[in-house]
Each structure stands twice: as structure tokens, then as C-alpha cells.
Amino acid sequence: MKFRTELINFADGMTLDSGDRLEKFELMIETYGELNESGSNAILLCHAFSGNHHAAGKNNDSEIGWWDEIVGPNKAIDTDKYYVVCCNNLGGCGGSSGPTTINPSSEKPYGKNFPQISVKDWVNSQKMLMDKIGVPYWHLVAGGSLGGMQALEWAISYPNDIKKAGIFAAASNSSTQNIALNEVARESIRKDQNFHDGDYLEHNVIPKSGLKTARMLGHITYLSEELMDSRFGRRFQDEDSKVDQEVDFEVENYLQYKGEKFSESFDANSYILMTKAMDGYVAGQDIGLRDAMKNVKSQLLIVGFYSDWLYPPERGKEIQMAAMDNNINSSYIVLEGAHGHDSFLFSSEEYSKVISKFIES
Amino acid sequence: MKFRTELINFADGMTLDSGDRLEKFELMIETYGELNESGSNAILLCHAFSGNHHAAGKNNDSEIGWWDEIVGPNKAIDTDKYYVVCCNNLGGCGGSSGPTTINPSSEKPYGKNFPQISVKDWVNSQKMLMDKIGVPYWHLVAGGSLGGMQALEWAISYPNDIKKAGIFAAASNSSTQNIALNEVARESIRKDQNFHDGDYLEHNVIPKSGLKTARMLGHITYLSEELMDSRFGRRFQDEDSKVDQEVDFEVENYLQYKGEKFSESFDANSYILMTKAMDGYVAGQDIGLRDAMKNVKSQLLIVGFYSDWLYPPERGKEIQMAAMDNNINSSYIVLEGAHGHDSFLFSSEEYSKVISKFIES
């Protein structure tokens, strides 16, 4: 599959939700397929916490995109028919402006001084991107988890610029338990001796073990108990393939491996910024979800997964109830989902059909 | 309530489940009430992961015992009628021999060299205690969580020495997810710069931040999502009462506070040892639970709590099914439990009645 990766420059910057100014910024995007003449076939994909602009296909590093099972030629989001755009979130570490990129005013990486970004800021920056790349409106904005929050916020903030929103394994805000789990992850990063109060880049180190522990915990929350049980059970790890000698069980080895890998590539300040954005998001902050959805004009598809305990299906139902209160054309469906919270990433016959029917409807 | 605290010495030591020898050891115990003449009124309480021998009443440090809502005069476990004994688990850090006590062969604290203890070892050491303090048999052995595992193991290992076993919020082994969560906690301790591969006492430091992170995670697993939500919701913490300036939400502040407090008193090597024991326990390791329970003679009470997601009620049902296969006199009851996994600690009208009726039956 052909795709283009591009760094889009916003020289005039933007004013953030918090009132802070970002004097200028860049968004790293990846696009698939072609925009048709009428401009009616554009789809925006919003990535989840640890995703980036690389949504589908194999990139130059041979990495498969995060939504490759759903996005591609003849897949549920069909890149032969649609012009699909995915951008790395502002404040992330996949190429868009963020803690690891250069702060023009200091000529050093922003580090901990990159301003706190909100879900609304992401949506606003994506609206600026839409205008910049000549997309008249999005036929669909879709994403899972934190990406689903962005899709919901698009429907609320830009009712005239979006025809459909796909909100998968998401919620209109984070639960107390979501916040609590993120705080444990942040605590492990902040207390890493190499964190240096966020100034680790200046010390030429990274808080690798803090990031690793954070990701190990994250992984547990992304998988369901049933999946972990069927995949690993209580099997012991072979002595020869232990990644850490302290490990006894296969599941421990798996978490160690996954955590280690993540800690080599993700930025710690981005981790804190992105989780704070997720924790802080409330759709309709001041007026409540129901009133916030009053102006929504797009059609909604809300998908939850039974095996998801991080954003369980009831959280999707809250959005559906608010949609119904506003007579919005909205479908809410709960699928089995063999992968816990991560189910939104993987294709299944039902899930793919639900998405493609929604797009074509 | 009167209680006695005593350090019991086992000069002949014991051979552990692993084959290792503990040349000698001590158990710190607390007892309530009086053993009657026939010796028919003794009850053993087994503590959970972070508990100790101080089960009820206020001790000299004004600390309330971990099961004070259940144990005391006229309470479900009535110390006016029963002679109640609780001992700090071997390998713990509440006064019994463990990583912080002196290794007689080196005359320094054991530290990481304290041998790995198993749930069976705890039960074996408690049997030695029973013989030593002149208790002919236990009318009841009871505990929650890891304490419930010990009560189950008592019923299996010493069928002639126990009349009843109370197994609360427990399982016959830890699930994959239980192991995974414990591994994250251990990882955060091991990677604390002050851990020094377990030799922190020799360096005159403690891995405080690792312990803190571990406990913060533990707390989330002990509470139910509903309880966290109703107690903290998404409320922001007052600026004035923040224990850490990085905190935004009340729930974060609570976890920070609880984690900090725990990290000042619990030993890191004990943390690792106790969680490894929990992870490693399988009732009927070689023959399966059903066959392991063949010789059980005691009456069983198995209690699960709907709000417990760490050891959910289905785990108790597995024990009940194995009991039924063996025609054991066993009751299995699932209670609401407002406190998640911690529900076993708190009295409710139903829970207290279930326990007291079981004891008197």
C-alpha cells in the first residue's frame, strides 16, 4: 500500500485550551489513498495513547501501522476508496511538535516545558490540518480509546466539518480508576533517578526503568483477564529465554519484554503529557455531555467491547444515551472483543462489517 | 480488649517446602481471649499480604488491628468466647523472622538471603506454633486473600487439626492477571536506585519510591472501580492539601498519601517474598484441587464479594465445586461488599452473621 509521510508546518502557531500560546508547531502526518475531486472521501484517524501517525502498512522501519487490520485496500476503512489521514498528536513523540522537538525560543528540546495539551487542542490542531491540506470536511473521524475521545470531541466542536464519528472503546471522560492507574504510571516515571524533574534530555539520559514499569502496567490494563489467562496461564518461563532472571512466569517475561521495548522508544514527558490530557478530558466540561451534544450533526457509531475493563461498554452507553436525548442518528454496539481494551485495534468479521457499513451508510 | 503479644522461638528450625533449611526462627504472635480447658475454642487468623499479627484492638502504637471490625468481644469472631491467635507470617516484616531480622549465621540482617517461603511453609510453621502453644486443634482457621489461601491449605494439609476453615476473597491459586500485577509492583521495587539488588540495608537506605509505587498500584486493585468513583470521582485536590505538587485529582492525592505511608513501614524484600509466595501457590500443585481436597475433614465457608476484581467470586466457586465433588460440608456465599477486594476486612450485617453462624454451627 502506498502512503505519504509529511511534516506540516503551522508557522502561526495556535492558542491552546489553557490559554498558553504555541508560537509555531508541526504535525507529522501519514496519508493513504487519494482525495477525490469533490473532496467527499476524506477520513481522519485519531490515534490512542501510544500510537502515532503511522496507522497502516509497513513503513521504512518495517513497522506495521497500529490500525493495519482495519485500514488498507479492501479493508473496513478502504484506502482504495477513501483518502485517509492520520497525524501524530501534538505533544507526542512520533514527529509532531512535542517535548523532544526543538523549542524555537531556546533552541533546545522543549522537554518538560512543552505546554500541557488537551484533547480539545488535538482536535483544534487537526481542524487546522484539515484546512491546510485542502480537505473540505471529514466523511469520518474515527479512533479508539483516546482516539475515540477525539472523534467525540470533533462531533461536538466542529459539527459542520464532520459527517460521521466512530467512537471505539472510549468514554466521554476518564473514570477515577483510569486516572488512578495513570497516576501510578506517572509516579514510576517521575521517581526514576534519571527523570531529573523532566530535564533528562539535558542530562543525556532517559528514565527507562520508570517508562518500563509504566508500560508493564499499561499492558495489563489493555488486555482482558481472560486473554492473559488463555495466552499465558500459570506457565513457567523457560530458563533460556528469560529476559530477566527475576522472572518465573511467562506472563512476567512477556511484560518485561514489552515494557523494555517501549521504554526504548517512547518519551517520558510525552507519556506524562498524554496521560494528563486523557485524565483531564471531559466532553462538555461546563455544561454536561447531554447539552454539549446538542449541536452534533454527524452520525455516530459507538462500539464497546465486553472484554474491555479499562473503558468498559457502559462508558460507550453513556454517550449513546446523550445522543438519544438529542435525537442524534447514533448506533451503539457491544462486541465480544477477544483482546480486552485493545480489541478496537483488531479486525473481526463483526467489527469490520460494523465499521464498513457505517462508512457506506 | 486485652491481648498478649509474644515472640515464640523455634530453636530447631524447619525444613522449607523448597528443601532449604531455616536453622531457627521466631514467630511474632498476638492472642486474644483465653483457651478453655478442653482446648476446643482456639481460632487461628491468617493475615493477608500486608497484614501482621496485630489483628484486633489498639496496640501500643495506637494502631487498630487489621480485622478489628470482625474480631473482638461480641463481634463475629468473639474473643469473649474464643481464644484467637494471629501470627506474623514467616518472611514478613512484623516481627517474625524475615529479611529484616538477624541471620544467626552472619549476624547481619538476612536481607535478600532470607529463603523464599511458600504458603505451605506458613501453614507448616503455624502447625508448629499450634503444637508449641498447647492448642490441641483449631476450631477455625480463617483469613482473607492470601490469608484465605492459608486457611484452604490448612484444611488440605492438616485435616485432623482443624474443624472449620473460613476462606474469604481468596482463590486456590493466583490468576495470570494477579501475577502480572504483582510483577509490576516488584519491578518498581527492584528498579529503585536504592534497592541495590536487595542489599539496601547494608547501604543504609530503603527503596522507598519503588515501594510507594507498588503500594499505589496495590491500592487500586484492593478497591472496586465503583468505590473509587463514589469516594473520589473526578474531584480536584485542594491546592493546600496536596501531598505532591504533581497531583491534580483527589484520587491521585489519596494514592500518593497511602503509598508514602506504606513505604515508610514495609520491607521491600518482604514485599517481593510475600508476593512470590502468593503467585506461586497452587492448592494441590501436583494432583489438582479436586484430588487435593479428598482428605479434607473440616467444614468450609467460602465467601466472595461481587465488587472484588482481584479475586472475584468465581475463584471462590472453583473451591466450592471441588468441595462438592468431595462431599465436603461447604458453604459458598457471594456478598455485595462495598470495598472491592478489601471487603473481607470490613464488617457488614450479612458478612458478620455468616461468619458467626458458621463458627457456632
Image: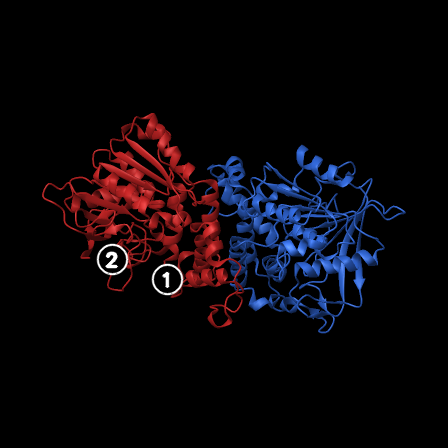
Chain colours: A blue, B red
CA–CA distance in space, label 2 to label 1: 32 Å
Residue at horizontal 39%, vertical 57%? B268
Badge 1: few (under 14), some or many (20 or more) residues near its Cα, within 10 Å? many
Q: Which residue is mark 1?
A: B201
Residue B119 rendering spot, x and y as whole percentages: 33, 42
- Mark 2 is on which residue type? Gly
Q: Nearer the viewer, residue B287 or A122?
A: A122
- Mark 1 is on which residue type? Leu
Q: Is residue A102 visible?
A: yes
Q: Is residue B217 visible?
A: no
Please state if B133 lies on the left or on the right of B48 as rendered.
left
Q: Nearer the viewer, residue B50 or B361?
A: B361
Q: Residue furthest right?
A: A37
Badge 2: few (under 14), some or many (20 or more) residues near its Cα, within 10 Å? many
Q: Which residue is mark 2?
A: B57
Please state if A138 lies on the left or on the right of B92 as rendered.
right
**Callout 2 secondary element:** loop
Residue A17 rendering spot, x and y as whole percentages: 68, 65
